[in-house]
Image: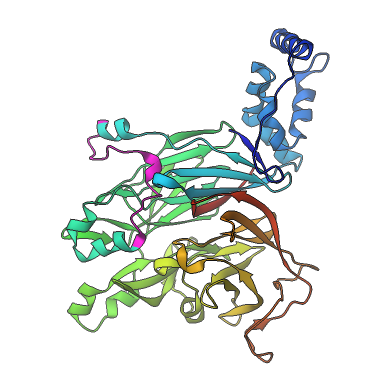
């Protein structure tokens, strides 16, 4: 799966065989295994597969090189079904970054071994898109990592064709389901894409998946009931880019997209004048799966301002949208360009509030009984906050809350919230809140712990996903 990076060494670790007799023995051993009808001599393949299933995933990188039969076994779905039956699955963190020349790179972190792996680049789909009659001759990996910022893209909603027509590919959404990572949509200039690409970590390859029903960029994704939901985004319309109210759902088992009722955007329907209705564009600024429903915070947008208007909730059992609870919508912290990021860990909904200072932030947890966001005591260290378009990412890895950011040395730092006695509180280091504040959750023993770092240089954070394989 690419070169292995060691945090301790700070460089790629490549395993080399010594010269001479050891190398000769290795070649003899390799040919022996190629000729052997069994994975491990003298053992039935059923037992060999059981042995392989108990090994850490990081070992599979080298074991693929033993022989063709071993490689075939390691990329076989049956091996991973056995791992699941044996409760040997492992959660890895996958981080997408944008480097120099807008080059997109995926890296995977094994949190146990604390080793990083490079993933293959997304394929060049210029010819594929061109053969379909689309105007999209470009590189797929430029889709998310455009140097054009989100604000530039959204300003096209106001009908500024001169700017939107100059945009390269950008605005993809990313989701993870059924053990794979999906990259969806995006647009070049003002032409929205419907294409979907899927990364299979078992095969370590990208493949094209079933396209969405409509082209959309800057849409929001979330997983509910083992299906991938996509809502909102923008597409090309008369006079420029226009926001989408539509939603759809993908079943990875069948490869079929199905329609979901449109978001009503009810708050946008009650604006007092036609002028405001034309000026303020409704957008979905986030989506999260929480307590069996999809929660979509929304805003009204007029460059350069975002006006929070709460949000809406989709219930798959009734197939209906309803208004989001007032406290949840009003208190949901906003990130860059109005984006509202969140993560669910052990059934609790968390969001990072970046407004506390220039080099730190506060974590909030939503209390569904009180319909309020509670500020968790202690600062989350995030450096150079104002200089980054995407200063942090949130993830729920191995049942714990994680914040991914860049430290003062330009390293990507993965920080874990250590929680003791199954407490849902977070670390207590300092707090600007009053001791009597009802929205303060206390913790005296928990701390933020850096579990891994990787030298990133000028790379910017884009997205992160968790896969359990």
Question: In front: 128, or 88?
Answer: 128
Question: In front: 319, or 465?
Answer: 465
Residue 160 percent location from the top left of the image:
19, 62
Q: Residue at x 82, y 17 (%)?
A: 43
Q: Residue at x 30, y 61 (%)?
A: 152
Q: Is residue 383 left or right of residue 309?
A: right
Q: In this view, does 371 lie above or below 146?
A: below
Question: In front: 238, or 313?
Answer: 238
Give the dominant element type of the magenta stretch: helix, strand or loop.
loop
Determine the image quadrant of residue 429: bottom right
Q: Residue at x 64, y 65 (%)?
A: 347
Q: In this view, does 367 lie to the left or right of 229?
A: right
Q: Is residue 92 visible?
A: yes
Residue 289 percent location from the top left of the image:
53, 61
Determine the image quadrant of residue 422: bottom right
Residue 196 percent location from the top left of the image:
40, 42
Q: Quadrant of the N terminus?
A: top right
Question: In front: 9, or 47?
Answer: 9
Q: Which residue lies furthest to the bottom in this view?
A: 436
Q: Which residue is drawn at 66% across and 60% down?
A: 415
Q: Is-magenta flag for residue 134?
A: yes
Q: What stretch is highlighted in magenta?
A: 131-150
Q: Is residue 137 left or right of residue 449?
A: left
């Amino acid at each position: 799966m690419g070169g292995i990076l060691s945090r301790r060494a700070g460089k790629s670790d490549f395993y080399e065989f010594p010269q001479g007799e050891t190398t000769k023995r290795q070649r003899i051993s390799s040919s022996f295994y190629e000729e052997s009808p069994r994975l491990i001599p003298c053992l039935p393949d059923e037992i060999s597969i059981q042995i392989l299933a108990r090994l850490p995933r990081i070992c599979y990188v080298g074991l693929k090189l033993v022989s063709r039969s071993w490689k075939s076994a390691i990329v076989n779905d049956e091996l991973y079904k056995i791992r699941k039956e044996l409760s040997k699955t492992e959660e890895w963190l996958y981080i997408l970054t944008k480097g120099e020349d807008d080059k997109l790179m995926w890296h995977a972190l094994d949190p146990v071994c604390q080793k990083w792996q490079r993933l293959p680049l997304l394929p060049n789909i210029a010819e594929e898109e061109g053969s379909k009659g689309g105007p999209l001759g470009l590189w797929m990996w430029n889709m998310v990592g455009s140097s054009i910022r989100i604000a530039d893209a959204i300003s096209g909603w106001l009908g500024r064709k001169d700017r939107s027509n100059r945009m390269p590919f950008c605005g993809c959404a990313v989701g993870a389901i059924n053990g794979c990572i999906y990259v969806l949509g995006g647009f070049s200039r003002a032409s929205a894409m419907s294409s979907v690409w899927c990364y299979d970590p078992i095969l370590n390859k990208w493949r094209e998946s079933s396209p969405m029903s409509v082209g959309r960029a800057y849409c929001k994704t979330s997983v509910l009931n083992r299906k991938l939901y996509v809502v909102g985004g923008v597409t090309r319309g008369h006079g420029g880019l226009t926001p989408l109210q539509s939603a759809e759902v993908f079943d990875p088992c069948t490869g079929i997209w199905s329609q979901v009722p449109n978001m009503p955007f009810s708050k946008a329907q009650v604006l007092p004048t036609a002028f405001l209705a034309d000026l303020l564009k409704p957008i979905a600024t986030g989506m999260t799966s929480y307590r069996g429903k999809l929660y979509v915070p929304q805003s009204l947008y007029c460059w350069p301002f975002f006006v929070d208007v709460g949000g809406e909730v989709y219930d798959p059992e009734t197939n209906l949208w309803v208004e989001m609870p007032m406290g949840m919508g009003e208190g949901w912290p906003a990130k860059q360009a109005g984006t509202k990021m969140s993560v669910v860990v052990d059934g609790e909904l968390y969001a990072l509030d970046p407004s506390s200072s220039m080099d730190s932030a506060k974590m909030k947890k939503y209390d569904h009984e009180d319909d309020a966001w509670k500020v968790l005591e202690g600062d989350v260290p995030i450096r150079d906050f104002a200089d980054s378009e995407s200063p942090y990412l949130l993830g729920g890895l191995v049942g714990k809350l994680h914040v991914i950011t860049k430290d003062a040395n330009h390293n990507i730092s993965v920080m874990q919230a250590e929680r003791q006695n199954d407490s849902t509180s977070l670390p207590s280091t300092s707090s600007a809140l009053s001791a009597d504040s009802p929205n303060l959750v206390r913790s005296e023993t928990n701390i933020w712990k850096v579990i891994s770092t990787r030298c990133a240089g000028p790379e910017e954070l884009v997205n992160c996903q968790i896969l359990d394989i």
